[in-house]
Amino acid sequence: MANPPALGTQPRIRLFKHLRAWPILVFIIAGLVVLPVLSVFYLALFPTDNIWRHLYNTVLFRYLEATLLLLTGVGLLSFTIGVTTAWLVTLCHFPGRRLFEWALLLPFAVPAYVIAFIYTDMLEFAGPLQGTLRDVFGWQTRRDYWFPDIRSMGGAIVLMSLVLYPYVYLMARAAFLEQGSNILAASRTLGCTPWQSFYRVSLPLARPAIAVGLALTLMETLNDFGTVDYFAIRTLSLGVYDTWLNMGNLGGAAQIASMMLVFVVVLITLERIGRARQRHFGQGKPNQDSALYTLTGAKGWLAFMACALPLVLGFAVPAYQLASYALGNFSSYWTDDFIAISWNSLFLSATAALVTVVIGTLLAYGRRLHPNRSVRTFVSLSKLGYAMPGTVLAIGVLIPLATFDNTVDAFLRARFDVSSGLLLSGTVFALVFAYSVRFLAVAAGAIESSLDKVTPSMDKAARSLGMNSLETLRRVHLPLIRPGLLTGALVVFVDTMKELPATLMLRPFNYDTLATYVYQYASDEKIEVAAMGALMIVLVGLLPVIMLSRSIQGGRKAATPVLPVAEQG
Amino acid sequence: MNTTIKRTVKHLTLAALPLAASLTVTAAQAEEVNIYSYRQAFLIEPLLEAFTQQSGIETNVIYASSGLNERIEQEGRNSPADIILTPNTTILVDAYDKGLTQAVDSDILTSNIPAQYRAEDNHWFGLTTRARVIYASKDRVEPGEITTYEELADPEWEGRICTRSGKHNYNLSLFASMIEHHGEAYTQTWLEGLKNNLARTPQGNDRAQVKAIMEGECDLSLGNSYYWGAMMTNYEEPEQIAWAQSVNIVFPNQEDRGAHMFISGAAVAKHAPNRDEAVQLLEFMSQDLAQYMYAQENHEFPVKPDTPRSALLNQYMGDFVADDVSLTAVVNHVEDASKLVDEVGYDF
């Protein structure tokens, strides 16, 4: 079977001269998106004090050690959970499989800081579990027995993995589906045991997709502040905070944040390499039912448990706990204000998802048409926002917006003696801009990998039929990459629902979202009030998660028409 | 385009309408005052409602736990901020140093707020005070066994003290006051001693330390005075009442300089578009009613000396000696304190 050749090796598709518009569009959009990151670099040029000597002599290596340990732990555990469950639901028949296919995405709707809060409440010394144990065994104090400390590196790794593994699951499952079962069937006839065909065939083929999922998981882990702060784990993102607020050295903080981008460049490269290989994939024909093995008896139950465990721990338990807090006093929390706040979140998330996907599509398509070095560099740069600590990025967003506002205002004052005030700062626009900057990497990942799978001969065919590049995008590519667009949009939607630091800092007057609502009460230990907001985040997040899962099912069908053409390419 | 997408777009448009409408009607020319608050909005809400009732001036609030000074700085002369409201002096002094504040010459403010709790040039004002106290286990620590901050470093307390992160502003402020009183070298040795006495890696907030005392993990902790009141009256989570009841409050250094004090406070922004309203709000907040309400809300101490106090405060935290060291001087040592915390590896 012929593999579609890499796009970069194709002669450039250029039918009309005005196609030059695409690189310019890419530069403008990517330039706007990258402005906040550049602003942070700019801040890094003006530290009030050289922070590095102090850090190097004292805590730098401890921060690094904690950061690397956390990344490694979350990476390994998310990989294990995500890949195992994706493999099971895609390739095996066992009880509950149909349910797990979509339900395994549910933990994604639970913010990491919320799950950290809930499990601490349940598992600490005064919590119900240890209380029951003490009652049953007659223990009195902490010294009478051993119980793992939830607020520890181990606890953070487990809890963050429980809500982040869906990134890996999502990507791995899509890859397993695409492989189709005939490749595996072939490996089986060649004498592989089921384990061997997983380890030697499925896993290597899915590795690029898994790398994408893992990269997203790790970036989210890297910029987490809420959970590590709550669990007293001193990672680099705490170092950023400390340098900025306690040492009054925003420039120094920006330097650490910029240094953290080194991690990201490594992760993005990993993702890139992964996707580059994806093009050379053998194209198995996906079947409507990809399952190859039927697990019965003990094996079936084992598979059931393997899928049920992350679902129960990552979703059912926290959702139940939140519901029991919130519903106890439902009527006093379910106010007009609260409904308005929920609307704000819904509106912002939907808008951010739409805007980010449009930007992501334009950039990905521009890169496809003109895969030269400068276009590719710009597109890659535009994704850096995802890994910056949110508070620092928020300042990065503030700088270009306020500069724009004040420049316009100064001009109008000088020329016409009128003031325009702040046009963009402190508006919903600022928030949506911040979300797009932050989550573009997530959307772009999904869109690019979809787009890469469309063979270039499709472009040629469309062009030879007289369509221009925009029409080709609209009538050929968009329908084909619909699953990728939806995935991107829905992930951005859920991530925006959960976003806190930029929302807090950039929002308009008297404007709350569910995340800021939860934060302001949770930070004052009013858990019952906060729970209502957290529950709402989870519930609203469910919607896209379910849609997402259905779109993957749909994607299986949508992928089919691509294949015959791909074989000609 | 697929029908579901069309429908989604339609719903989005519908969702956008009310919001667009709400944006265009911002600020009908009523009198208003814009507050950038580092304190949670719900904490100041009752007070602002009382202000609006009394003055007819509407209030607008943005709450964020960090970054508001940076926002005002970037917004420059067009910043809508009238008042910056903060839970500590560090942020007030930071705003002052960045040139974001302006002087307010008001007899009401200067007569209500003692000089030690406001900036010399009246660029910022304290509104409530709190003390950093030692909480001591009722069961395991005799009254009088510990009376000063300095004694926290004594070897007899080895493995018996819990605190939150040394990097938290409340601890840094106390450590900074130690630098102001004793110098950096002494403070470093003292911090090393305190670190050696810790029962566990610093974690959780001030209340969590009191809880750890009740659970037997440690015998002493550092905490702000008002948390005790907050726990004692937490009828939504009554287990916190038990935490509070397991400890005695020790106001340290009563024989010498007194307990370390913080303020929550406010400043009028340099480019305040509603300066008069902002000053009115500040003055309102320094008067008896607001002082009582603001302090009562969070079990803090009113900054105006003769303000009536809540029964709880009177009963458990009557008269005590408060350190009257310059708050600005303390804030100026916070950076050094933060570095010392790193040097002794306090948080690890």
Image: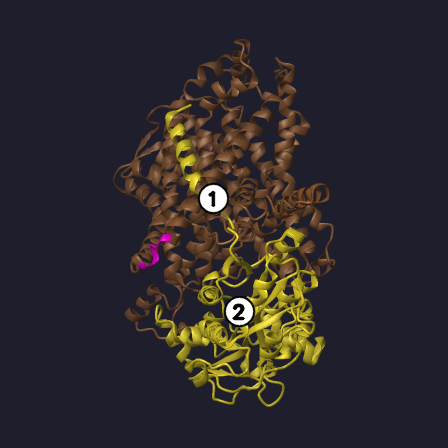
Q: Chain of mark 2?
A: B
Q: For residue B164, which numbered disc appears in the image?
A: 2
Which chain did the renderer colour yellow? B
Q: Chain of mark 1?
A: A
Q: Position of residue A140 (x, y in %)?
A: 35, 75
Which colour denotes chain A? brown
Q: Residues within 10 Å of mark 1 (few under 14, many from 20)?
A: many
Of A334 and B181, the residue lying toward us: A334
Residue at x-position 67% and y-position 56%: A250
Q: Main structural element of the magenta stretch: helix, strand or loop?
A: helix
Q: Is residue B51 above or below residue B220?
A: above
Residue at x-position 68% and y-position 28%: A373
The reply to whether residue A121 is visible in this rendering is yes
Q: Position of residue A129 (x, y in %)?
A: 33, 63
Q: Position of residue B112 (x, y in %)?
A: 58, 78
Amino acid at pointer 1: Asp
Q: Is residue A109 above or below residue A321?
A: above
Task: Give yes or no for residue A406 being in the magenta stretch.
Answer: no
Write down the residue under mark 1: A495
Residue reaching furthest left?
A297
Does dot 1 land on a helix, a strand or a loop?
helix
Q: Position of residue A360 (x, y in %)?
A: 54, 32
Q: Is residue A536 above or below residue A361?
A: below
Q: Which residues are magenta?
A: A332-336
Q: Is residue A68 left or right of residue B339?
A: left
**Quadrant of the frame with the C terminus of chain B:** bottom right
Q: Quadrant of residue A116?
A: bottom left
Question: In front: mark 1 or mark 2?
Answer: 1
Q: Is residue A121 left or right of residue A275?
A: left
